[in-house]
């Protein structure tokens, strides 16, 4: 009892704490444990940084298999077999965004079949050119009920269908002005904003083109759709890029990121462009006055063979001819080929040439390039005689420029002293053409500009401080003058940003034609660029600038 035991060594168990012991006589049937493998399983896994884990999750989300909900099929592919059109070639859903985009709440397959039937009916009515106002009102009412359960592809198809018939602008009566259908906008706009990130480049381009046809200047949706196209530019085809450029030029949106990416895309893939796409891109650049020499050279190389092979329609031929001239691009061979093809078109099929093409050709050849052909000009004027009673504001203004240039200049560009300022071409024309000229000269413009810019008013104020009698916002028939000093015969043109090419200090051809026309009418024209005036910070500097400008008026004394 009192003896102390020797210290015993601790028992070394063959298993770790918490593991199952080795098999005994009571459990011999169980397989023996493998302590080596268990030890390996308890190794601490490596710790990854938050950045690496974020990349892993994004890769897993990217390669996750699509959900089998049965509602991701494109409505465009469903109606392609039963309705005509080219929409079956468009893929409006971005596969990489299906899991990220906010999908509409799930509905029963039977209920969604009704939605697909409605979308199919809308598309068939649009492609069949059904313009029944009561029918489209009924479609809008039905869409307001099922809009929340529509898929992104259905939204694109519905937007395209309403744009095809231009439903947003409707005539309530022949004597009442047009108005917008606000109910349609309230239905579609939130859905487009909700699903815009899940659309492919084709879907976003389709939305932009639909907004253009409907004349809906919703710049939030335009900016969102353009940003999506810029993000996915690698997957965009030339048709998507062309439609986007055409829509942005219509809304006068200078999206610098998109236009820079368009320059790179056309430089690398210009061999994939069709003549139609090249002409539309050229027209978009001309509308925004974007003058990129390398891009214009690529487009010229693409369009000149098409012009020589007579592959362009009369609309595209005139559009190409006018756009290159507006951008002041030196392409003499292209201009000559366009004039010859246009002349042959007037000789063979004059009934196919519309009034818009006739007016654009006359304005471009006579006023911008100063290279008209007598026979072509005379034939164009004769074709316009049948439509002189329906001339609109835009066509009338262009024809007024043409008439003044023909009366003041010979085809070679020098004045005609023998005919008292009248061109021999107009004197030799028939009575119908002379009636058209008289109709154009008597036409009164509508919706003329009434307000001046802030810095134009500032120029007028500086002239008033020096007791210079002048008039502001003066119209000489169809030409506008910011400031007119009647006693001196001086016209001051305050050239703003739209009078210059984008990112340039060169005047546009339109501004130069207006200045030349005023000079032909006997005025001394002075141009004040906006960038020079903005650089003047004090009234004294502005007054010194005007005094220095008056020294160039050789016909009058300078401002004291």
Image (cartoon, rainbow, N blue to C red):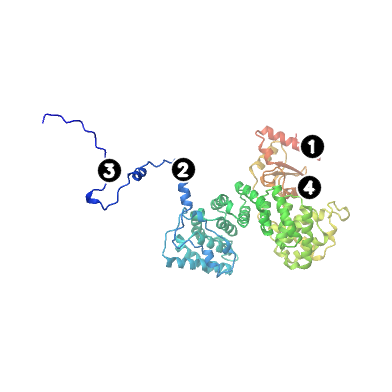
Distance of mark 2 from mark 1, alpha carbons? 77 Å
CB contact under 8 Å: marks 2 and 4: no
Label 3 secondary element:
loop
- Determine whether 178 is above or below 249 in the image: below
Tag shown at residue 557 = 1
* Real-space CA distance between mark 3 and mark 4, rounded to the nearest whole angstrom: 103 Å
Residue at numbered disc 3: 18
Q: How far apart are marks 2 and 4 (CA)?
A: 69 Å
The quarter of the picture where residue 549 lies is: top right
Residue depth check, mark 3 versus mark 4: number of the one nearer the observer? 3
The residue lying at 79 percent from left, 37 percent from top is 557
Mark sitting earlier along the chain (1/3): 3
Q: Mark 4 points at which residue?
A: 519
Quarter of the figure with residue 397: bottom right
Q: In this view, does 541 lie to the left or right of 139?
A: right
Observer-nearest of 123 and 231? 231
Residue 112 percent location from the top left of the image: 45, 65
Distance from label 3 to label 2 (Cα)?
35 Å
Q: Earlier in the sequence, mark 3 or mark 2?
A: 3
Using a 10 Å C-alpha cutoff, classify the residue at mark 2 as few (fewer than 14 neighbours), some (14 to 19) or many (20 or more): few
Picture coordinates of residue 77, whole percent (x, y): 53, 65
């Amino acid at each position: 009892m009192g003896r102390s035991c020797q210290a015993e060594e601790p028992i070394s168990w063959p298993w770790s704490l918490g593991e199952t012991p080795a098999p005994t006589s009571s459990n011999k049937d169980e397989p023996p444990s493998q302590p080596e493998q268990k030890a390996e399983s308890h190794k601490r896994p490596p710790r990854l940084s938050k950045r690496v884990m974020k990349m892993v999750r994004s890769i897993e989300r990217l390669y996750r298999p699509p959900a089998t909900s049965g509602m991701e099929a494109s409505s465009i592919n469903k109606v392609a077999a039963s309705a005509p059109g080219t929409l079956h070639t468009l893929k409006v859903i971005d596969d990489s965004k299906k899991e990220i985009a906010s999908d509409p709440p799930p509905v029963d397959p039977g209920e969604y079949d009704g939605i697909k039937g409605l979308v199919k009916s809308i598309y068939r009515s649009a492609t069949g050119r059904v313009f029944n106002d009561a029918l489209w009102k009924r479609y809008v009412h039905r869409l307001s009920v099922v809009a929340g359960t529509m898929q992104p592809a259905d939204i694109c198809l519905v937007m395209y269908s309403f744009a095809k018939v231009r439903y947003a602008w409707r005539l309530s009566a022949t004597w009442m002005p047009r108005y917008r259908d606000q109910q349609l906008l309230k239905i579609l706009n939130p859905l487009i904003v909700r699903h815009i990130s899940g659309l492919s480049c084709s879907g976003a381009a389709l939305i932009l083109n639909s907004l253009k046809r409907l004349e809906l200047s919703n710049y939030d949706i335009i900016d969102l759709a353009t940003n999506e196209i810029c993000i996915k530019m690698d997957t965009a085809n030339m048709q998507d890029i062309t439609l986007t450029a055409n829509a942005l030029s219509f809304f006068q949106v200078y999206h610098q990121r998109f236009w820079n990416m368009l320059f790179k895309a056309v430089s690398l893939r210009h061999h994939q462009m069709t003549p139609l796409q090249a002409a539309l891109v050229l027209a978009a650049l001309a509308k925004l006055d974007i003058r990129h020499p390398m891009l214009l050279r690529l487009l010229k190389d693409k369009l000149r063979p098409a012009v020589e092979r007579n592959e362009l329609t009369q609309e595209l031929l005139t559009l190409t001819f006018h756009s290159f001239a507006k951008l002041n691009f030196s392409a003499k061979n292209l201009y000559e080929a366009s004039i010859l093809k246009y002349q042959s078109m007037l000789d063979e099929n004059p009934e196919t040439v519309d009034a818009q093409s006739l007016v654009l050709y006359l304005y471009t050849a006579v006023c911008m390039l100063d290279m008209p052909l007598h026979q072509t000009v005379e034939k164009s004027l004769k074709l316009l005689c049948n439509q002189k009673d329906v001339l609109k504001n835009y066509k009338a203004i262009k024809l007024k420029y043409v008439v003044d240039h023909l009366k003041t200049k010979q085809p070679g560009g020098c004045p005609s002293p023998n005919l008292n300022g009248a061109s021999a071409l107009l004197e030799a024309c028939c009575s119908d053409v002379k009636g058209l000229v008289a109709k154009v000269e008597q036409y009164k413009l509508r919706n003329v500009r009434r307000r001046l810019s802030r810095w134009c008013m500032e120029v007028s104020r500086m002239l008033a401080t020096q007791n210079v009698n002048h008039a502001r916002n003066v119209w000489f028939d169809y030409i506008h003058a910011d400031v007119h000093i009647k006693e001196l015969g001086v016209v001051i043109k305050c050239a703003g940003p739209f009078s210059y090419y984008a990112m340039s200090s060169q005047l546009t051809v339109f501004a130069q034609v207006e200045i030349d026309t005023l000079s032909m009418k006997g005025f001394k024209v002075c141009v004040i660029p906006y960038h020079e005036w903005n650089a003047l910070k004090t009234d004294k500097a502005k007054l010194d600038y005007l005094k220095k400008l008056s020294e160039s008026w050789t016909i009058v004394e300078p401002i004291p």
